[in-house]
Amino acid sequence: MVAVKMQSSVLSALLLSVYYTYVSSLYFHIGETEKKCFIEEIPDETMIIGNYRTQLYDKQKEEYLPATQGLGMLVEVKDPDEKVILSRQYGSEGRFTFTSHTPGEHQICLHSNSSKFSLFAGGMLRVHLDIQVGEHTNNYAEIAAKDKLTELQLRVRQLVEQVDQIQKEQNYQRYREERFRLTSESTNQRVLWWSIVQTLILVAIGFWQMRHLKSFFEAKKLV
């Protein structure tokens, strides 16, 4: 009984960890020509959904107000190989979606390229960004209504998808560990060869100095 409770506690902790890892919400400020980029470590074959909304600073009211519909926001996403997997123009509010095919650090960049925004020279734009990764992209209310699932069936489905996300994360961590091991072995091998080269150079210089000193003493008839 105690073992079952401990396993349940460990599973709950893992699921809670995944929840906080794969849901992030923030806001930031950008100027009219400024570009903001974020790095998100994502396992392969994982869906990502980003929702954002913008607010423009009103100098008269001294507060941020909802931006006009004419304001454009360009969203660009690059995979770990610097390949662009998403580049699209959105409005003042938008929702972007993409699926990772390569595990690693994905770069998500947002910036305004609307000509109307230039009317607010010197102003600031506040962007609220919410990023959901993996099973958190699912709308379980819609899934339950579509598939006519009971509350228990829906909860089981959530747990299965959360466990699947944990497995993807574990695979990604093993992938990172493998890359780190290969990098460490390569670095150690280079350090070893560099030490050998340094030793050979020192031996060669010492031999040359001995020959030079011997020739000098023989020329001076000291030997």
Image: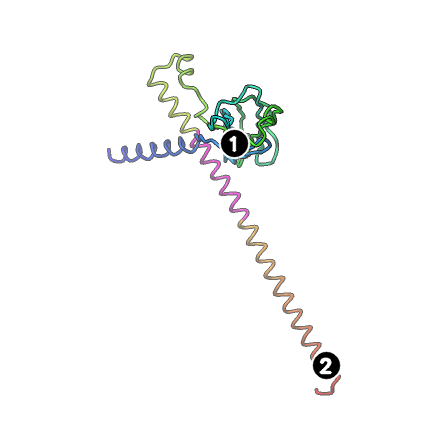
Say what secondary structure mark 2 lies in: helix
Q: Quadrant of the C terminus?
A: bottom right
Q: Is residue 49 visible?
A: no
Residue sitting at x 30%, y 34%: 9
Task: Please state which amino acid type lies under the numbered disc 2.
Answer: Phe
157 shown above or below 18: above
- Residue 128 at x, y = what percent? 48, 28
- Residue 133 at x, y = what percent? 47, 28
Considering the whole magenta stretch, tell me its main secondary structure.
helix
- Residue 44 is marked as 1
Viewer-nearest residue: 102 or 78: 78
- Residue 91 at x, y = what percent? 56, 21
Q: Quadrant of the N terminus?
A: top left
Viewer-nearest residue: 87 or 1: 87
Q: Is residue 192 visible?
A: yes
- Residue 17 is marked as none
Say what secondary structure mark 1 lies in: loop
Residue sitting at x 61%, y 65%: 199
Q: Is residue 169 magenta?
A: yes
Residue lying at the far right in this picture: please name it.
219
137 shown above or below 20: above
- Residue 216 is marked as 2
| Mark 1 Cα-neighbour bin, 10 Å: few <14, some 14–19, many ≥20 | some
Specify start and end residues of the magenta stretch as a single range: 165-183
Task: Please state which amino acid type lies under the numbered disc 1.
Answer: Asp
